[in-house]
Image (tube, rainbow, N blue to C red):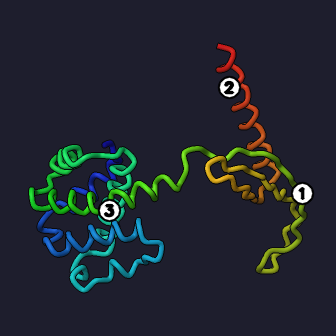
């Protein structure tokens, strides 16, 4: 598994018994799985009394690192030996490796279902509509007098069959930049298909 340096640092802090005692490690690991698999989970899982002695920045960093590693392992359908090897490289001790692998195995099916529901392909743009808007004042009643474009992309999600809309507002310069980038992408695709 390849994870960013930031995630690896967070994961190595999580492996440090001086930073996370066994109880705090277990709580944080379970909180990471809960936050991924339970749609009703909130940040209160990190407010456990046994985690109060840990710096909140470190706690959130390690929580994010654990969640990222869990997702990456699920994405790659990692087995116990692959996961154990990675955890050893991150300086986890035997006890923490066993706990991590046990939690992962217990939640593996739910994790795969979650990852499968996200989808495998990007949405396809089926239509674009736009309109010009002229802003006269802002919310704070400052005079603006500038044009803005409201763009709506109609997209089709092939995995779920849904047709959501993506809307955004941009200035003339931003719209010109977007059009230029789309033309560049189109030319690159044409060149690639001609090879």
Residue at position x 77%, y 56% in the image? 170
How far, Cα to Cα, is label 1 from label 3?
48 Å
Left or right: residue 185 compared with residue 139: left
Residue 34's place in the image compared with 120, above or below, is: below
Place of residue 41 in the rendered image (x, y in percent of width and height, measured from the top left): 43, 76
How far, Cα to Cα, is label 3 from label 2?
42 Å
The mark that comes first in sequence, 3 or 2, is 3
Q: Which residue is mark 1?
A: 131
Residue furthest to the bottom? 49
Q: Which residue is mark 2?
A: 188
Q: Are marks 1 and 3 in contact (CB under 8 Å)?
A: no
Callout 3: helix, strand or loop? helix
Place of residue 74 in the rendered image (x, y in percent of width and height, measured from the top left): 36, 51
Q: Which residue is mark 3?
A: 107
Residue at position x 17%, y 63% in the image? 99
Residue furthest to the left? 94
Quadrant where the N terminus sits is top left
Residue at position x 22%, y 46% in the image? 86
């Amino acid at each position: 598994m390849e994870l960013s340096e930031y995630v690896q640092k967070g994961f190595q802090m999580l492996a440090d018994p001086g930073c996370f005692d066994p109880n705090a490690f277990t709580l944080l690991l379970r909180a990471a799985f809960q936050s991924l698999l339970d749609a009703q989970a909130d940040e209160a899982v990190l407010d456990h009394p046994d985690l109060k002695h840990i710096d909140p920045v470190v706690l959130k960093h390690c929580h994010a690192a654990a969640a990222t590693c869990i997702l990456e392992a699920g994405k790659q359908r990692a087995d116990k030996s692959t996961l154990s090897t990675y955890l050893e490289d991150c300086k986890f001790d035997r006890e923490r490796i066993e706990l991590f692998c046990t939690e992962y195995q217990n939640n593996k099916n739910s994790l795969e279902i979650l990852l499968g529901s996200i989808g495998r392909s990007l949405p396809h743009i089926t239509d674009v509509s736009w309109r010009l808007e002229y802003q006269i004042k802002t919310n704070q009643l400052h005079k603006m007098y500038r044009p803005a474009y409201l763009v709506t992309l109609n997209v089709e999600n092939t995995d779920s069959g849904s047709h959501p809309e993506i809307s955004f507002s941009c200035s003339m310069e931003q719209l010109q930049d977007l059009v230029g980038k789309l033309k560049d992408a189109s030319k690159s695709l044409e060149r690639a298909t001609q090879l």
